[in-house]
Image: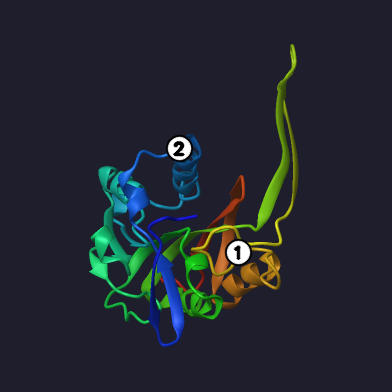
Amino acid sequence: MIEDLKSIELKNNIYKYGAEWTKHLESCDHWIFYWFQQKIMDGFINKNKSETIIEIGVGSEFTANYCRSKGFNVTTLDIDEAKKPDILANVVEYNFKEKYDHLMAFEILEHIPYEESQKIIKKIPTFVKKFAFISLPRNERTLLNIEIKLPLLKKIKLEWKILARKIFSEAHHWELDYKGYKTKMIEKSFIDAGLKIRRKLKNRYIYFYALEVCNHDYI
């Protein structure tokens, strides 16, 4: 449960968000998520070309600041004024005034009603030139997670996961494989929008995607 959960209603759609969590020290698991956010971009972004990045959803701003420290020009956009984004706006309705080389949208789309999230996916090629990096949670529970280290052998990891059939976060409207939101259907929506899945990673219950904008003209 998110204690500082806030919501606003725009055109009969509820948008959920919170900022209080960004003020506290974060868990080991969250730091690992940050690492995967960087890993999904590895090899696809190039600071030597002065590339620009738009991040939707500021969060703690860790990844944005990390990319800035590596020489990237990062612009942030968020609906929550408390997070102090560069652009304060609802991404569903916002008309982007320029194109960016890359998009980062980690743990964002599930906070938006599904139909509205699809509008965002469809318009990505209108404001992104090269790659969109997106993460989404899968609606699953881990019943067993054991790591065994045997002499002279590598570590053996045993996992048993099942669909949760319930969304535990009050801030999420939908998740991968929850009811009708099948992973294959969501991935097809990427492809239908002109986004090619170039890399897919998973850590715990989060899928990370590197999506190439197919109608780019930067080559």
- Observer able to see residue 219: no
Q: Residues within 10 Å of mark 2 (few under 14, many from 20)?
A: few
Q: Which residue bears the numbered disc 1?
A: 175
Observer-nearest of 32 and 71? 32
Label drawn at residue 68: none
- Left or right: 194 in relation to 59: right
- Rendered view: 41 above or below 111: above
User: Residue 126 location, x and y as percent?
Assistant: 40, 78
Q: Which mark is residue 27?
A: 2
Q: Position of residue 193 (x, y in %)?
A: 54, 77
- Residue 191 in picture, x, y percent from top left: 60, 72
**Foreground residue, 161 or 5?**
5
Say which label, 1 or 2, has the lower sequence index: 2
| Quadrant in which the C terminus is drawn | bottom left
Residue 27 figure quarter = top left
Residue in the foreground of this view, choosing between 40 and 30: 30
Measured as percent of width and height from the top left, residue 16 is found at 43, 68
Question: Which of the 4 image quadrants contains residue 185?
Answer: bottom right
Tell me: 46 left or right of 147. Answer: left
* Rendered position, 84 above or below 179: above
The amino acid sitting under disc 2 is Ser
